[in-house]
Amino acid sequence: MKASVVMPVYNEKNYIDEIVRRTLASPVEKELIIVDDCSTDGTRARLQEMARAHADGRIRVLFHDKNRGKGAALRTGFAAATGDVVIIQDADLEYDPAEYPKLMAPILAGKADVVYGSRFAGGESHRVLYFWHSVGNRFLTLLSNMFTGLNLTDMETCSKAFRREIIQSVKLTEDRFGFEPEVTARIAALKCRVYEVGISYSGRTYEEGKKIGWKDGVRTLWCILKHNLFTSGR
């Protein structure tokens, strides 16, 4: 079974070579779809070099002409996916591509339509960083669960896998980090079979390039309400 790994990228010059190397080395059949969201730090030029060097199709690089946000980059990548399973991979080294087999296993077994890689389930290692971030993540997950009826431990995880026909059929509109609560509301409304697996997590600091902030948390709160109470359909 082939995976389409969708990697949204914005200003990741210091990490892009290593995350691409790790992704290509992951032990699953795959295509890597990188969507550059109009990077300005040299990442874009490096990705153009990669695209030329991998004419065999293992890497496909798509470019946005203006910065539109992570959610918009993911939509671009989802539309281009051809694999049986679509996996989201951030470009910042926080999530380990070596764990794709674990993420895909419930789908391959015919048990799941969607799998979330949880940073709070299981006994995998994770870097100890921001206390209030973990509190915020758990609160937002709890609030999302109250509306969707799911019992996720980590709605905000960036590590997610979908059967391709599921993610390509879902109507998504959020351009930034509101993608996480929106897609969760959509798959819950579709009654998808959702599994969680415990994953490792190597979070980075703001000094190391972390981008999400408190304003994104407030936006996520609004998106939970918006997509569970005020928006209907796929």
Image (tube, rainbow, N blue to C red):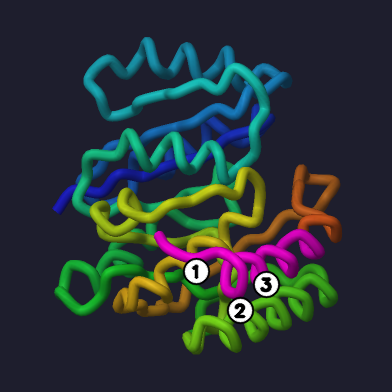
How packed is label 3: few (under 14 Cα within 10 Å), some, or many (20 or more)?
some
Q: CA distance from mark 2 to mark 1?
A: 8 Å
Q: Position of residue 140 (x, y in %)?
A: 69, 76
Q: Position of residue 232 (x, y in %)?
A: 49, 65
In the image, residue 94 sits, relative to residue 124, either above or below, namely above
* In this view, the mark in front (3 or 2): 3
In the image, residue 14 sits, relative to residue 87, either above or below, namely above
Q: Which residue is mark 3?
A: 225
Range of magenta residues? 217-234
Q: Which residue is mark 2?
A: 144
The residue under the point 65% across, 53% down is 177
How packed is label 2: few (under 14 Cα within 10 Å), some, or many (20 or more)?
many
Q: What amino acid is found at the position of numbered circle 3 in the picture?
A: Leu
Between discs 3 and 2, the one toward the N terminus: 2
The answer to whether residue 165 is magenta is no
How packed is label 1: few (under 14 Cα within 10 Å), some, or many (20 or more)?
many
